[in-house]
Image (cartoon, grey):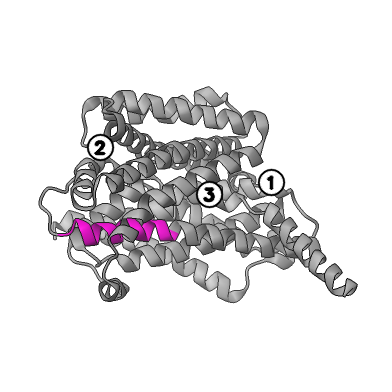
Amino acid sequence: MSTSLADTRSKFQRARSATVLLGPAFVAAIAYVDPGNVASNISGGAQFGYLLVWVIVMANAMAGLVQFLSAKLGLVTGMSLPEVVRERASRGVRLAYWGQAETVAIATDLAEVVGGAIALNLLFGLPLLLGGVITGVVSLGLLLVQNRRGQQPFERIILGMLGIIAIGFIASVVISPPSVSSTIGGLVPRFDGTESVLLAAAMIGATVMPHAVYLHSGLARDRHGQPEAGAARARLLRITRYDVGLAMLLAGAVNLAMLLMAAKTLRGRQDVDSLESAHAAVQDTLGPAAGLLLAIGLLASGLASTSVGAYAGAMIMQGLLHHRIPLLVRRVVTLIPALVVLGLGVDPTRALIISQVVLSFGIPFALIPLVRFTTDRTLMGDDVNGRITTLLAWLVAAIITALNVALIYLTVAGN
């Protein structure tokens, strides 16, 4: 009896210690449920019903593989992805690479700040520009928590916001369940014209986000260090798989809920061409409570994701240029373009979708080096990618690149 009790306690302690090691993937997962996802997924569901369900599922599966490879790179090498690029590239290449990464960071912040501004407008009637400023200020406060108190308190705050986001968007699907048969039918890969390709690229850009790929390598390294090769590293990599798997499962459920809600509730309506009108339609169809939860979820999404995005931007700049700038300056650099867009009166929902397409074009610049580095035995040692992992990783990069080429062709051809 005592032996059994001791075994039970030992298993409980191991499970508890493993749970404590979870967290970095959930911070990175915020990138997969940001306002850009909301705009892309709701637009996809409202315009094409269940047609693009397969894009959500495929993008989430690809994101899981990519995020694990990013975390593994950080744990095995003790460097973030931007730092490895810096170590292996010439100065000119580093500067050009940083230029495209900074463009991606600006597009990221545009989506997140605009989303937060829209949510504050829906909840409190605030002007969009004022809402954007408030979103930027609150995100700076969250970054100060990470800067002064360390990574784990920041992780707990972000995890709490992730829970709010999940409740806000999954609630509508619970209130009005979608068609099971149509959802299954949506798993068949297909498109329906240029706009569906544009939205698919936006949905993938909002899911497999470049800044999350860069960030996760640094998050894992900063949280766990560089464990010695052997049992300790193997255990940490195994726990990281669970961390990524659980985070991607939650993010995928939220993304799918957004599209299914729009497909069930908003499909065929002529008055749904923005997040504001989508919110009004949900409120009219499902009631004030569903509309309130959606707006709260969007606000939490904007606040959390813009904080994580600015954190990633600082890590990218420090890694590539070996230059640290004050947190306030880093926050302002990517905030200003978003405020300019809001101040000029550009359609915020369209700006959100276009920003996600920009992100999609930035993905290969993050993915190709990541796959290349994690397949380099001189860099990864015994933890180098296996043949199947390498094949899948290159396939992911090829699919995303091909989708972007198709998007350019269809847009230029006007089909």
User: Position of 298 compared to 394: left or right?
Assistant: left
Q: Is residue 86 left or right of residue 192?
A: right
Disc 2 residue type (three-letter): Pro
- Where does the magenta region start and end? 252-267
Q: Secondary structure at mark 2?
A: helix
Residue type at mark 3 is: Ala
Position above or below: 391 against 150: below
First of labels 1, 2 by sequence position: 1
Mark 3 lies on a secondary structure that is helix
Q: Which mark is residue 223?
A: 1
Give residue 28's mark: 3
Which residue does the image show at 13% across and 59% down from the upper left? Answer: 268
Question: Within 10 angstroms of label 2, few (less than 14), some, or many (20 or more) residues?
Answer: many
Looking at this view, name the residue that lies furthest to the left. Answer: 270
Tell me the chief SS of the magenta region: helix
> Percent x, y for residue 20?
70, 52
> Which of the two residues, 239 or 123, is positioned nearer the viewer here?
123
Pointer 2 residue: 348
Check residue 383 for magenta coloring.
no
Q: Quadrant of residue 207?
A: bottom left
